[in-house]
Image (cartoon, grey):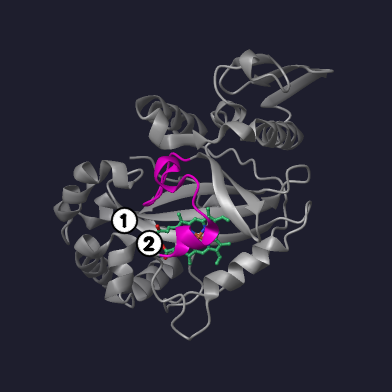
Amino acid sequence: MFKSTNLDQFPFPFTDGNYRYSNDLKQLQDVNCIEITPEYKVQIQKKRELLEEQPDIRFQSFPYTMEMQWEVLEMLVDMAVDRYPEYFKVEKNENHWTFQNLILEEKETFIFGDETSIPHEPLDFIGRHFHNDFILMVHRDDNFYLEVGQISYAALFSANWNKGMSFDEIHAPVPFVSRTGVDLMARVRDFLLRIEPGSPWTRINWNLMADRWDVNYETMDVWGPERSKVNEENAGKLVHLRVEEQKFYRMPRSNAVLFVLNTQFLPLEDLPKRPEWLELTYSVLQDIPKPMAEYKGIAPFLAPSVAYLKNLVKEVKVK
Ligand code: HEM
């Protein structure tokens, strides 16, 4: 199972030891979403395998989104070349483009705007060069609708399952969001409606995974029973803290919001490398209300994970 090795690039999610929801959106400082990690090749290989294995679950779009997808392709190519000129190159002769990925030694030649010149739809095509998940939320009727998605690292989410859903429908199962009588998700949606081109926003979401890269409803028969393999002894290796760095971009031409996810994993046994992370993770996990653990799909292995962390915290303190 793949894990992050460069802890400086790991988006550790907790800042205090309690568990609660809030509107934690922040303005994104570095607007470029392309990030090459030491695990790049493994991530891309796995992402492409998943896309080949279950293409209809992992990529979905509506036919009228082609122009919007080309706009995303252009943005991602420009960002990649701008940030990593040693890894990515592009030549644009009017509509005739050549994009080179020097890490994978791949050269893509195509006609910008012409889907027949590429083997997949534009976002599915360019998304295979970056380890992120990409979702295009189209702005209509004061809401956003999921109309294109390339999703390979899902936590109870898939392009197939969520295609066509509004922002509100997607978030309907989230528990506690209106605990205080305030509809947090309606506020977040209104906030997203005000995002301007050129000023993206970001937030972090997290979960735990039991020896899995991704979980979606379509493969629940496989990963569901596996969660009960976890015990107090093996939790350090099997259970991973799964963190999604989420970025939200208003696309200037289509007015859609592009949602980019950078998902990273850290096995619980690596937490002592940053003792403050170990303490915070233990503290948050033992504070999670039961309905929340159930919603996140972690209820079957939360107790052994917390017990494992409790022992680890003691061991680290003794040393
Ligand atoms: C616009 C793009 C967004 C998409 C496509 C999206 C998608 C999702 C999905 C699929 C889930 C899981 C829902 C389920 O249980 O079925 C989720 C959960 C959630 N989303 Fe969003 N989301 C978006 C933006 C946001 C924003 C801006 C926030 C800001 C607060 C947010 C907050 C949450 C929270 C708190 C959860 C529950 C997560 C957990 O505890 O595991 N989402 N979102």
**Gap in Å between the C-alphas at discs 1 and 2?**
7 Å
* Residue at (51, 63) in percent of width and height: 168
- Taking the magenta stretch, the answer to whether it contains residue 240 is no
Please indicate whether residue 230 sits to the left or right of residue 113 in the image. Answer: left
Determine whether 12 is above or below 216 in the image: below
Look at the image and give the residue range highlighted in magenta: 151-172
> Is 289 left, or right, of 58 in this rendering?
left
Disc marking residue 272: 2
Identify whether 155 is placed above or below 112: below
Hey, what amino acid is under mark 1? Glu
The disc labelled 2 sits on which kind of residue?
Pro
Mark 1 and 2 residues: CB-CB less than 8 Å, in contact? yes
Quadrant in which residue 300 is drawn: bottom left
Taking the view exactly as shown, the residue that stands out farthest to the bottom is 180
Task: Determine the secondary structure under disc 2.
Answer: helix
The answer as to whether callout 2 falls within 8 Å of ligand 1 is no
Judging from the image, what secondary structure is the residue with disc 1 in?
A: helix
Residue 216 visible: yes
* Nearest the eye: 286 or 272: 286
Q: Which residue lies furthest to the right in this view?
A: 94
Q: Name the residue under label 1.
A: 269
Figure quadrant of the C terminus: bottom left
**Which percent across, then down, holds residue 260?**
58, 47
Category of crowding for the residue at label 1, using alpha-carbon neighbours closer than 10 angstroms: few (below 14), some (14–19), many (at least 20): some
Relative horizontal placement of residue 237, taking residue 143 as reference (left or right): left
Where in the figure is residue 41, as x and y percent of width and height?
A: 49, 29
**Ligand 1 has an atom within 8 Å of the beta carbon of the residue at disc 1:** no
Q: Rate crowding at label 2 as few (under 14), some (14 to 19) or many (20 or more) other CA atoms within 10 Å.
A: some
Residue at the spot 55% in from the left edge and 30% down from the top edge: 124
Tag count: 2
Residue 88 is tagged as none
Of residues 252 and 225, the one drawn nearer to the viewer in this rendering: 252
